[in-house]
Image: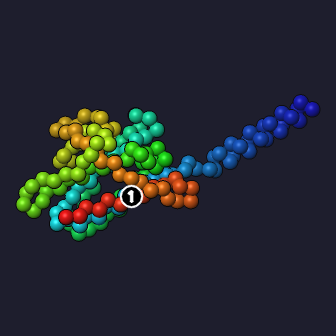
Amino acid sequence: MTLNLFRRYIIAVALLLAVACHVGPAEAWVNVTIINNRPHKLFVAFCWAGFDSEDDRRIGWYPVEPGQSRAINLGSAVSSLTMNEFGFYAMGTMNNGKKISWSGDLREVVIDPKNSFDGHPDDPIRGGQTVGFRQLKLKKVGDRNMDAVATLTFNP
């Protein structure tokens, strides 16, 4: 009797392991569409919260030409973790040479104002500066509401 119960246990564990090996991790993503209706080029950066502070991320720059739009898929941003802590910072130079930026008070993040960057929001960057990121509201989508989308529109 004990041997029969042990066999059932082994078969059940083997079956669970087989199922676990065939089921891949859920890949939740965040997709942001940037629409640039301004007469000058824009550069956009994003930051988001992770599972804990060590998983927080920042990434930039995504250039968008005047009158154009661009879809950005941030596959490493897990929408369920970052719904309320997803932000952006944008900057550009107007045709008259005046610098313009879109910032906010969601989070202070270290950025490189001239070069692309990626990493933790607090990591130092040579020549970097600290700026405030503005919250971007994400909308849940997908079969299980695991993914998220947002649209950023920059008008004159």
Looking at the image, residue 68 sits to the left or right of residue 72; the answer is left
Depicted 96 relative to depicted 133: above or below? below
Q: Position of residue 38 (x, y in %)?
A: 20, 65
For the question of whether residue 101 can be seen, the reply is yes
Quadrant of the image containing the N terminus: top right
Residue at position x 22%, y 38% from top? 130
Q: Position of residue 106 (x, y in %)?
A: 32, 42
Identify which residue, 70 or 4, lies in the foreground.
70
Q: Position of residue 35 (x, y in %)?
A: 29, 64
Query: Residue 36, located in which quarter of the rendered image?
Result: bottom left
Identify which residue, 134 or 115, lies in the foreground.
134
Residue at position x 44%, y 56% from top? 139
For the question of whether residue 76 can be seen, the reply is no
Depicted 48 relative to depicted 54: above or below? below
Residue at position x 58%, y 50% from top? 24
Q: Secondary structure at mark 1?
A: strand
Looking at the image, residue 71 sits to the left or right of residue 41; the answer is right
Q: Which residue is mark 1?
A: 150
Query: Residue 67, located in which quarter of the rendered image?
Result: bottom left
Quadrant of the image containing the C terminus: bottom left
